[in-house]
Amino acid sequence: MTEFPKTLEQAIAQAAVATSAAIADGYTRLQVELAIPELKPMSVAEQFLAEFTQFGSQLKVFFPDAGAAALARRDWGEVPFKIVDIGTRSPLEEKIEPEDEALLFISPSAVEVERVEKLCELATCPTVMLNPRLEDVAIVGIGYAGRQLRTRFLNNIESCYYLRPIENISVFRSYPGEWQIWREIEEEFQLITEQPTKPMGDEIDAILYGDTSQSNSTEAANASGSRKPGIFASMQRFLRTLSR
């Protein structure tokens, strides 16, 4: 079992190992999520790429636009991989080459989701999303088109590494391990539960505040409101823990 990360660097190193393991097991559409809003995508990407080196010049790194790609080229200097942008001007077919062995998308958003999907279809190699933001309901939609997109593409991306703090707990998964929930107790994280599927809202609430019946839901809500530390405060604590 992968241990809960004690530093941001450890989390990123774990993410690279989990990604490589999933690729070795035959997964071709993957995502890595360090779901902490305060983290800067460029910094996380640079550290992840330093650990994810096995593809060398056959790795192609995609940024959402030409400006972000140019910034990475300037700040990162000489790198063994190729830096490109998803873009909207050149044909997508020209962005994929036979020698590509892996594609890494840096923080693609729902604005680019159709082009990302097309690039994944064109590629014959593994594709990895690093901190994607592809499921913005306001853009993707909740109607037929949105459901179709989720069925054929978004729901078929394997989450090989996931780390998200929620109040005083964190949801964690590192492939090939199960999904886990860790609770912060006196600045230490302790494993509470693990399961084969990603824990969602009601499951997390039950762990945080206990499973209450409908008859006393108002009382429970009021009581839980007094003991919630606030998402921002919890994330600040979590960032301090990872930065040690």
Image: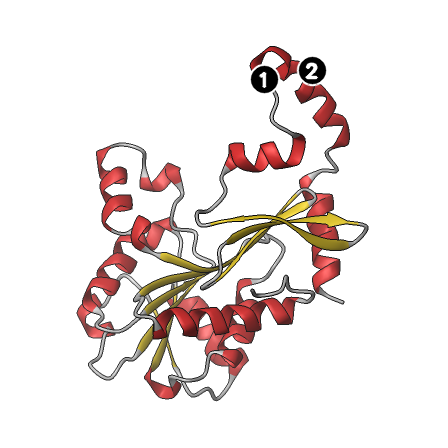
Residue drawn where x is 35% and y is 75% of the image: 24
Residue, disc 1: 213
Percent position of residue 50, x then y? 52, 80
| Numbered label tally | 2
Q: In this view, does 34 lie to the left or right of 121?
A: right
What secondary structure is found at the residue carrying circle 2?
helix
Residue position for label 2: 219
Quarter of the figure that contains the C terminus? bottom right
Does residue 49 appear left or right of residue 102 in this picture? Answer: right
Residue type at numbered disc 1: Ser
* Residue 237 x %, y %: 75, 52
Q: Residue at x 64, y 66 (%)?
A: 8
Q: In which quarter of the image is the N terminus?
A: bottom right
Relative vertical location of residue 145 with respect to residue 41 in this rendering, above or below:
above
Position of 193 relative to 162 (above/below): above
Q: Is residue 91 visible?
A: no
Q: In this view, does 8 lie above or below 56?
A: above
* Residue under the point 49% across and 73% down: 16
Residue 116 at x, y percent in the picture: 29, 59
Residue 129 sits in quarter: bottom left
